[in-house]
Image: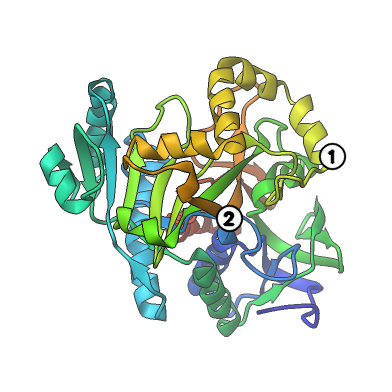
Amino acid sequence: MGGPTDDPAGDFDLAVIGAGILGLAVARELMRRRPGARLVVLERETDVAAHQTGHNSGVIHAGIYYPPGSLKARLCVEGARAMYDFCAEHGIRAEACGKLIVATSERELPALDELERRGRANGVPGLRRLTPAEAAEIEPHVRAVAALHSPATGVVDFAAVARALAADVEAAGGVVATGCEVEALEPGARALTVRHARGSLRARFCVACAGAWSDRLARRAGAAADPRIVPFRGAYKQLRPERARLVRALVYPVPDPALPFLGVHLSRHGNEVLVGPTALLAGARDAYSAARVSARDLAETLAWPGTWRLLRRFWRSGVRELAQLASERALARAAARLVPGIEARDLLPGPAGVRAQALARDGSLLDDFAFSATPRALHVRNAPSPGATAALAIAREIADRAERELR
């Protein structure tokens, strides 16, 4: 990987901000289209995949949840296929273990029907409606009145994918420079000046994939303040090793259609089964520890009008999530709706991640990928889940837009 010895200065054709999976996928796609181009990736941390890419559930989503015709729907289905191909080419283990979406009561059946409709409209491969007996054949310990089975859903180490993407970028002649937090973008007549923690450089065009900090950078470059990134912390527990036998692959509930979160689920990764996540507003954009609070991040969240409108609309959901964070018993009850028998004593400490979710001024959570353009730059303003799954397809979408600007 690139590091402090690389020189992120001088003149470049292209600059990419952010060395998460999306930024690196964009850099790789641009280098494939423009062999020999002078390209630099600027990363604020000391290594790639330091934030959302390295702190997520590792699920390759198949494209079931998203409204037909949306960017998420199209790019998730395309991206999942591309992700499996990329992993096969680079020797990265990606296991299509399959997923059950489980309806545990009759009142959830209309929402399950809608998910089935969306999945079929989106072209999700192999999607199948199951009876309780058929669901039990796949996950013997699940309780269901009906279920959807998605055999194309899988798991992978997205951080390993990001490292392979970075290696491809460097092999093609690009530079991946770490420790280069970008402070400003200043457009000129022929180039954009990118000021960063180790100096400055000039580029003909820039793509900003800044994740949790994307709104700040976009605003500094002249984009609208709306939407604002609001961080949500997702904490997982882990099933005790002797209880991991309860879950064979991935078991998800029918989600609340009003929220872009999928609810407490169970996901197997090798010999480990994760339970969660919770989804609560975080005190920092990198709050991987519950104790982590950034005065600036928290002040910006609380000053944004959309935050208070969101809280007024979904306070009941917030209370439930708070209970599941504070009480292992509450989290176990949520998991036991899917797999009866799970108890609080079965849960061990697990990992946590932060979702960079775009929130509009009116209090609505953006439910699709979103971009902003400023002079000589394109900003990714919203790319939460399934952003990692769709990274290679989103990269093609971004490269198409960049190509039009570079003509």
- Above or below, 85 against 148 in this view is below
Q: Badge 2 local density, few (<14 within 10 Å), some, or many (20+)?
A: some
Q: Look at the numbered discs 1 and 2 and tell me whether their residues touch, using CB distance below 8 Å.
A: no
The answer to whether any part of residue 263 appears in the image is no
Q: In this view, does 225 lie to the left or right of 367?
A: right
**Res 70 quadrant in image:** top left
Residue plotted at (33% across, 52% down): 250
Q: Mark 2 points at which residue?
A: 351
Residue plotted at (69% across, 52% down): 376
- Residue lying farthest top? 312
From the top left corner, tell me how far across and down residue 383 is, in percent.
Answer: 54, 46
Q: Which amino acid does label 1 sit on?
A: Arg
Q: In this view, does 182 lie to the left or right of 122?
A: right
From the top left corner, tell me how far across and down residue 309 is, in percent.
Answer: 64, 17
- Above or below, 145 against 237 in this view is above
From the top left corner, tell me how far across and down residue 192 is, in percent.
Answer: 77, 58
- What is the quadrant of the N terminus in the image? bottom right
Element under label 1?
Answer: helix
- What distance separates the C-alpha of mark 1 from that of mark 2? 24 Å
- What is the quadrant of the C terminus in the image? bottom right
Q: Badge 1 local density, few (<14 within 10 Å), some, or many (20+)?
A: few
Element under label 2?
Answer: strand
From the top left corner, tell me how far across and down residue 116 is, in percent.
Answer: 23, 36
Q: What residue type is labelled 2?
A: Pro
The answer to whether any part of residue 297 appears in the image is yes
Residue plotted at (42% across, 62% down): 241
Camera-near label (1 vs 2) is 2
Q: Is residue 15 left or right of residue 198?
A: left
Residue nearer the viewer, 37 or 185: 185
Question: Residue 49, which numbered label?
Answer: none
**Total label count?**
2
Question: Residue 296, which numbered label?
Answer: 1
